Image (cartoon, rainbow, N blue to C red):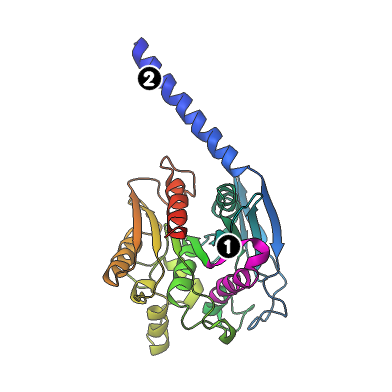
Amino acid sequence: MRSWLTSVSCCLRLAVISLLLLAFQTNAEVSVKPVQLYKDGIPGAIVSDNPGVIHRESPGDKFVAAVSKPSLTAYLPEQQHALSPAVIICPGGGYFGLSTIKEGEDVARRFASNGIAAFVLHYRMPKPSTMEVTYEGPLQDVQQALFTVREQAESFSVDPDNIGVMGFSAGGHLAASAATQFAKPVLKQHINSVKPAFQILIYPVISMTAALTHEGSRNLLIGEPADTPEYTGLITRFSNELNVTADSPPAYLVHATDDTVVIVENALHYFDALRTKDVSVQMLIVPDGGHGFGMRHRVDWFANVIDWVKYLSNK
């Protein structure tokens, strides 16, 4: 009995130490500053006056909906002795809203505390009342974020050739779209300037096909299913597994096998597409955790992501 209690006590101490280390990492000195995303209005916008409304709050998270005014916030390491890699973070929320803390701010702070600059993007929700082309609004925003950070890389002490994208759930779909559609950007001024250096996709929506997709995300982004050539074209365009090329950036994927919201086959199909094109890809499939766990998982997958980003930077 005593040895069993000693073992349990040891495990509890280790768990507490791990939580304290995570808290220390995410609360290390980080410089936070807003970044102007669009200088002269938002091309294609009809209404762009709403930074979002709080749809719901829970301990450690805030879900913001109805974003029509996009924003970009920088989280920068306080002490930098060399140009750092950078990552644009796209929180998830089914293209209805954004999980702004557990898939945004917390992630950015941990990146910055480990010497990697991070930028949280609150992209616009695709609504016909706020933008001319709903399915292009979010993609335009993430491409503008890549363009902006690259253009101002010197002021952020960021390596302009090492700026990647990261996304969770529907934000993962957006990040993957940025990684597969950079050659034909939404705005002409972004040609040859918005290719991500890498992509990090956490329980991502990858496909718009009926067998794989998250219906809510699909319906909000490209509309309800329709038997038309135009809709078929949108399915193909926004099914990222169908648009991988040999020029696609390296990828890191995380998904849980018991995810019933966005099925793990999304990640598996994307992994296969990347391998087929000889694109470097690393994947972690965990047996549990469901959907939307952020960094709050028994497996510290984020530590591996940090190592992976630094490995790419030193290649």
Is residue 159 shown to the viewer in this render?
yes
Q: Quadrant of residue 270?
A: bottom left
Q: Nearer the viewer, residue 288 or 305?
A: 305
Badge 1 element: strand
Question: Dot 1: within a 10 Å radius of its alpha carbon, few (fewer than 14), some, or many (20 or more) residues?
Answer: many
Instruction: Tell me if residue 100 comes above or below residue 209 in the rendering.
Output: above
Q: Where is residue 90? Give x, y as percent.
A: 54, 62
Residues in magenta?
139-161
Does residue 52 appear anywhere in the picture? no
**Residue 166 at x, y percent in the picture:** 49, 61
Residue located beneath label 1 in the image: 97
At a point 55% along the width and 65% down the height, the residue shown is: 96
- Which amino acid type is shown beneath numbered disc 2? Ser
Residue 117 in magenta stretch: no
- Left or right side of 229 for 73: right
Which one is nearer the viewer's eye here, 196 or 13?
Answer: 196
Q: Nearer the viewer, residue 198 or 263?
A: 198
The CA span between labels 2 and 1 is 43 Å
Q: Which is more N-terminal, label 1 or label 2? A: 2
Q: Is residue 304 left or right of residue 105?
A: left
- Give the image location of residue 231, x and y in percent: 41, 84
Say if the magenta span includes residue 140: yes
For label 2, the SS is helix
